[in-house]
Image: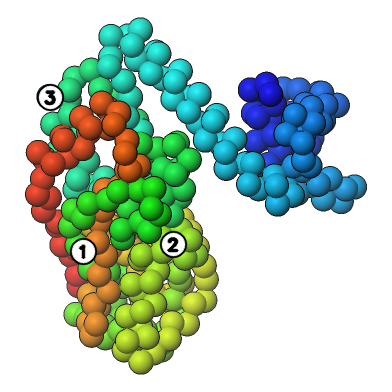
Amino acid sequence: MEFRYLVSFLAIAEELHFGRAAARLHLAQPSLSQQLQRLERDVGVQLVSRTSHEVRLTPAGEAFRAEAERIVGQAARAVEVAKAAAQGRSGTVSVGFNFPAGMTVLPPTLARLAADHPRVLAQLWERRSGPQVDALLSSELDVGFVYGRPRAAQLEARELLTLPVVAVVGRQHPWARRTSIAVQELGERPCVLFRREQSPAMYDAIVQAAAAAGTELVVAEEVDDPLATAVMVTARPLVGFASTARAARAGAQGLVAVPLTGPVPRLSLHVAWRAGDTSPVVDAFLTSLACAGPFPLKQPETV
């Protein structure tokens, strides 16, 4: 099985279109089709179902995709390690993070890493918690900062801090001058939320707090990107949600952060890594993290 076949398969899996996948790889479409056929012959099963109207992965293809991503990701990391060694560095640690980690945890951790392990380079990727967990499992990331303790048995985690969730509204929203909002009131106003797989712990904290207060959210929009959410809440009379770390920047985006009461949704920020990972660069990063803590949390300004 040739490595390039895996790369071609992943391009098809992501694009679900042979023309786009071929253009992305700078291949002629017949060549891409031949590579897929050879890969399927090597594997012994059909990986991609193709009709005149649709391209999709078969169940076997979906299962194969996860392993192919892991292999290609590990190969990319091997290249980075080799480059680091050639440049006199001891290696690279790939770190995923969310907003509160980026504002509170990473700056002192990276400063300590640079001081104690100057030959270790950290590559940073900002992502929501769900995609980070997927990337940790596929070895695309070495360390992640996520909401909630990951349930995957392959991952270890340590809690770093706990922070409340607040409501965010536009300056013209009827609730903009409130000092607090009871969670029970959330059922009275339309809100904007993200898909659960993007951040399961945050999603559950908000929805379960509403249920405990005897109400149900009226989700008018589902938006996964935090910046797009901020724009939508500014422009329309919707209620959004944010951690207190992100809400501390609400004013700069034309938003108002309002504390929630009864019960207050809360999030725990965890650092996560693959169980049994004995990589020196991961150990160096986690040691630097432990030495840099504890981490204070700034509270948002409210109106």
How many labels were placed on the picture?
A: 3
Amino acid at circle 3: Asp
The residue tagged with tag 1: helix, strand or loop? strand
Residue at left 25%, top 22%? 120
Q: Nearer the viewer, mark 2 or mark 3?
A: 3
Answer with the quarter of the image where residue 18 lies: top right
The residue tagged with tag 2: helix, strand or loop? helix
Within-10-Å neighbours for mark 1: few <14, some 14–19, many 20+? some
Q: Are marks 2 and 3 in contact (CB under 8 Å)?
A: no
Answer with the quarter of the image where residue 290 lies: top left
Labels 3 and 1: the sequence-earlier one? 3
Residue at left 46%, top 58%? 198
Q: Taking the image as drawn, is residue 247 in sight?
A: no
Residue matched to label 1: 163
The residue tagged with tag 3: helix, strand or loop? helix
Residue at left 24%, top 61%? 268
Residue matched to label 3: 116
Residue matched to label 2: 229
Above/below status of 56 relative to 202: above
Give the Cα separation between the discs numbered 3 and 1: 29 Å
| Residue 4 horizontal side relative to residue 243, left or right | right
**Nearer-the-camera pick, 256 or 60:** 60
| Residue 287 horizontal side relative to residue 49, left or right | left
Amino acid at circle 1: Leu
The image position of residue 184, as x and y in percent, is 32, 89
Above/below status of 234 relative to 158: below
The image position of residue 85, as x and y in percent, is 33, 11
The image position of residue 43, as x and y in percent, is 72, 34
Q: Nearer the viewer, mark 3 or mark 1?
A: 3
